[in-house]
Image (tube, grey):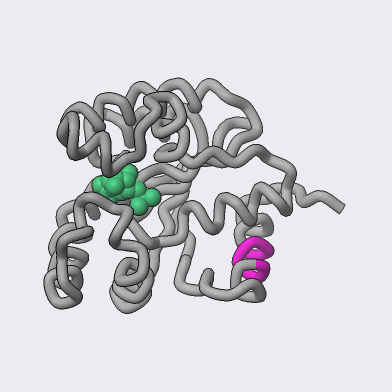
Amino acid sequence: MRPIFLIGFMGSGKTTLAKALSRATGLEYIDLDAYIEARFHANVSEIFAREGQDRFRDMERRMLHEVAEFEDVIVACGGGTPCWFDNMEFMNSRGLTVRLDASHERLLERLKKGRHRRPLIRDLDDEALGAYIAAELERRNPWYSRAEATFCADRLDSLPQIQQSVKEFTTLFNIPCKS
Ligand code: S3P
């Protein structure tokens, strides 16, 4: 089976859903940020601070090309992955791309909690974070909208919600689950 690439804004639930899908289907799960961190022995914030965003995007592209070679994997991309180079076209040519869509309220709620480990938003207060999400989502939409499919990721905030979303995702995309 060709890779499934989950794309979408920070906080859209790519990692949460990929992990849960992996447990349910037996497909391997790869978090692209974690893959970069393991390869370059530094976390994403350190890479941004030491080397700058352009260098991070270059690493991200190289690691994306590497994981795209794997079979039977679900790749949770970084929020910016589709928006640099020809990454979106590349993913579309290599596997199934699914955009996770969550409402502004959900993104804000999740990112208020998770902003400290994300270099692009770590220094924003709640108000600035809300404005950043609105503006950046609009800027990124042309790339995100090139995904082959869209999946609603508003309900990933409790175990029952995650289980239900996994059921819907596997049914929608015809992915067999472990018995
Ligand atoms: C980024 C999203 C992050 C990470 C980096 C940049 C972005 O991944 O790749 O901080 O540009 O949206 P998550 O979407 O997993 O937070």
Q: Quadrant of residue 86?
A: top left
The residue that appears at 22% across and 59% down in the rendered structure is 122
Question: For this rendering, which residue is in front, 85 or 146?
Answer: 85
Q: Camera-side residue: 155 or 43?
A: 43
The answer to whether 148 appears left or right of 70 in the picture is: left
Residue 50 or residue 30, whichever sits in front: 50
Q: Is residue 22 magenta?
A: no
> Is residue 105 depicted above or below 143 in this figure?
below
Residue 57 image offset from top left, x and y in percent: 25, 31
**Quarter the N terminus occupies:** top right
Q: Give the residues drawn in magenta, as a range.
A: 163-168
In the image, residue 90 above or below residue 117:
above
Give me the residue at 25% from left, 31% from top.
56
The residue that appears at 38% across and 70% down in the rendered structure is 110
x then y, percent, for residue 27: 68, 40
- What residue is at 43 percent from the left and 25 percent from the top? 39
Residue 87 visible in this rendered orientation of the protein: yes
Of helix, strand and loop, which mostly describes the magenta segment?
Answer: helix
Q: Is residue 179 above or below residue 50?
A: below
Q: Residue 37: horizontal and vertical position, in percent?
A: 40, 33
